[in-house]
Image (cartoon, grey):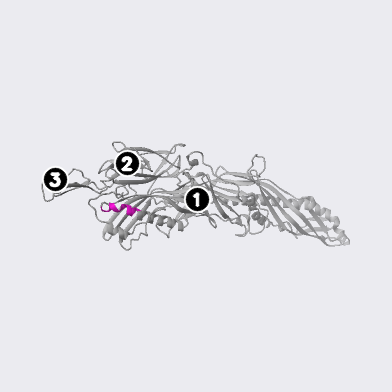
Amino acid sequence: MLARARSLALLLFGSTALACGDDSSSADGDAGGTAGAESGDTTAGPTTDSPTSGADDACACDDADPCTVDTCDGGACTHEPELTNACRPNIDVTFPPRAATITGAANTPSVTVTGTVASGLGTITALSLNGEPVTVAADGSFAHDVAVDVGGNVLVFETEDDAGNKRRRVQSFLWSTGFRKPTTPPDGVVPEGLGFWLAQESLDDGDHSLPVDDLATALELALGTFDTSAFASGDSPIASQVGYDVYLTSLELGSASVALAGADGGIRLDASLRDIVGDLEFDCTNFGCELAGGDGTGGLSIAAVQVTGTLLLTASPDHQLSAILVGVDAVVDPDDVNIWSNNAWTDILLSVVEIFIHDSLVASLEGALEDQVQAQLGPALANGLAALTLATTFEFPNLGNARKSIPVDLAADFTATDFHDGVAPPADSPPQGGAVVLRAGGYPTLEVTAYDNLGVPERVGCGLAPQSLTIPRQAPLEIALADDTLNELLYAGWRGGLLEFPLGGINGGGLIEDLDVQVSGMLAPTVSDCGPTGTLLATIGDIAIAATFTINGNPVQFDAFTTLVVRVDIQASENGIVLDLAEVERVETELTADESNIAMEASFVDLLEAQLVNGLLGQLGTTGFGAISLPQIDLSGMLGLPPGTAMLTIHTDSVTRENGTSVIVGRF
C-alpha cells in the first residue's frame, strides 16, 4: 500500500533553497506547468555559468556547461551539477498524448508509444516503460510497443542519466476497438445495456396472500374489484311469463383468481370470477298467478366464469414494450349454473329464467370480463414489466460542493424479449419465465469538465468478440447491468464535474499557509475486468493537481499527475446496489516542483498520494459512490386500485459478475 507522508515539520527543516547539489534523491516528475498542461512545457531555462575566482583571479573554471556550477578555490576548479528542471532528464511523449482515448484494431491490443528523452546534464543511460527496457536512439528518440487492455491503461516511464539523475513520467489513456459518446438520448446508447429476468416464481408463485410478491397477486386484486352489481337491476324485469315479472335484484362476486405462466413468446393468463350469486324476485301481475301461489323469490349461482388468453410481449421498432393479448376467451360451463325458487308453483318459470341466464346474463358477464382483461389487466401487466427499466435520475457526490450533487440520467428502452414455457419445443428451452433486454445509456445534466475526448470505451468482449448481456436465468428475479452502461454513467458524472474539486485536509501542523490544491480529472473513471486477473477495476487516470502553499514563509509550487487503479466491489444494498471503491491496487504519480524545492519532490509525492487517496476515495466511499436504487413498482393506478395497494418491492440478495455484466440477484 502507500507509504504515509512525512511530517511537514521535518520537511520544513530539511527544505533549503538549493542553488547547487546532487539530485540523486530520485526526484519524481517532469518540469513544472499548469495542471492539465503537458509537464515540461514551461520549464525555466538552464542557468548560465559565471566563472568564479578565488584569491587567484587567473583561475578561470567555466566549463561551458550550463548545467554545472563552476567554482574556483585556491586555484582548484570544481564543477558541481546544477539541480534544475532543465538540467535533469526530461521525457517528452509524442504519442499517446496525456489523457488520450485510443481506438485500436480487434485482436490487436497494442499501442506504440513514441517520444524523446534527454538530459541537460549528461547522457541518458536507461529508459524503461512499465518496467520494460526501452531502446533509445542516438538522437534520444524511442518507440516501444505496449500491450493494452480494454478500458484504462497506465504508462510509467523511468529514466536515468550518466550523472545518476532520475526522472519519471506518468500518464494514462483509455483503449478500445470502439467508443460511444453519450450526449442526449439515444445518442451513444449501449445496444444491450440493461436487462431483467422474471422466473415463474416472480410471475406467479401460487401464493396470492399479501403483501404482493408476484405479478399474479397484483392482477388478482384488480380482478377482485370486478363490479357484477351492474348486471342486476330491480327496475327492469329480465323475463315476463305466465303472469310473472322476473327481476334480478342483486348479483355479487364471491372471489376472483388469476394465474400467470411463462409461455413461448409471452405470458399465459388464466383468470376466473368465482361463486357469483344473485337474487331473483317473481312478481305476480294477474289473478292467474295469484292462484299459482302469488309472489315468490329465488336465486341463481354461477360457479365460475373462466377467461384465458396469452399476452405476447415484443420490443417494437420504436423501442417500446409491445403487449398484445391474443386468444382471449371467457367461458361458463352450463353445469356450473344453478337456478332455484322458493315457490313450487313458479318452477314453471325457471326454464324461462334459465334461457335468460345462459343467453343474456352469462354472455354479458363473459363479454365484460373479456373487455376488462383486454383493457386493464393486459396493459397493467405490460406496464408493470416496463417499470423495471431502471430509467431514472440518480446523483453522484459533488466533492467540490457537498450541498449540490451531480445528477445523471439513466435512460433505457426496449430492444428484445425472450419468454418461454420451459418445455420443448424449442429444444433446450430456457427455464419457464421471461427475459427482457433494453438499450441503455447514461447522460449528463451538467457540463463542467473542460476536457473532450472520444467518450466511453466499449468492452467488446475485452476486444476479442461482440459484446452481449449475460442473464443467468437462475434466480426468481435478476437485473443485469452491463459494464458499458456503468461506464456511461461514470462518464456522465465526470462531465458533470465529479473530478473537479479542491483537495483539502492537508495538515502541516500549522506550518502550511496559503494552501491551494486544485484537482482536475482529465479522464472519466472507467471500470473494466479485462485485465490479467479478471478483477473489476476502476482506472481514475491523469488526475492533474496544481498546488501552491508556503512553509514558514517559503513559497512552494508543484504540478503533478496521478493515476489511481482501484478495485470496485458492486454490492447489494437494502433497495438496490452500491459501487464501493475498495482497495487501492495501484497509485502512480509524476510530480514536478519549482526550482527551489526539487529536492523535496519525493516527500511531496508521499504527502500528495496519501491525501488524494484519503480525500478522493474516502469521500466517494462514504457517500455511496454510484449507488443505484431499484424502483418500487406500483401497479395500483394501472389496475384502478387505491395507491399502494398493488406495490411490488424488489429485494436484493447479492450481486454476481459474468462476462462484463453485473447481475443483481433478488426477488419481489
- Dot 3 and dot 1 residues touching (CB under 8 Å): no
List the single residue furthest toward the bottom: 510
Q: Does residue 475 appear to the left or right of 531 in the view shown?
A: right
Count numbered badges in the picture.
3
Tell me which amino acid carries mark 2: Ala
Along the horizontal axis of the image, is 486 left or right of 24?
right
Query: Is residue 600 located in the magenta-colored stretch of the structure?
Result: yes
Query: Tag 3 or tag 2, which sits nearer the N-term?
Result: 3
Q: Categorize mark 1 by other alpha carbons within 10 Å: few (<14), some (14-19), many (20+).
A: many
Q: Which residues are magenta?
A: 596-605
x, y percentage for residue 473?
60, 47
Q: Can you tell which of label 3 and label 1 is closer to the viewer?
A: 3
Left or right: 245 in relation to 596: right
Q: Position of residue 135 (x, y in %)?
A: 34, 37
Viewer-proximal residue among 254 and 597:
597
* Three-letter amino acid code at the position of disc 3: Ala
Mark positioned earlier in the residue sequence (3 or 1): 3
Q: Is residue 590 above or below residue 645?
A: above
Q: Secondary structure at mark 3?
A: loop
Q: Amino acid at mark 1?
A: Leu
Circle 1 or circle 2, nearest the eye:
2
Cα distance, mark 3 to mark 1?
Answer: 73 Å
Residue 74 picture location, percent across and down: 13, 50
Name the main secondary structure of what is drawn in magenta: helix
Towards the viewer: 36 or 540: 540
Give the spatial CA distance, label 2 vs label 3.
Answer: 34 Å
Disc number at residue 126?
2
What label sits on residue 410 in the rendered view?
1
x then y, percent, for residue 213? 63, 56
Residue 364 visible (yes or no): no
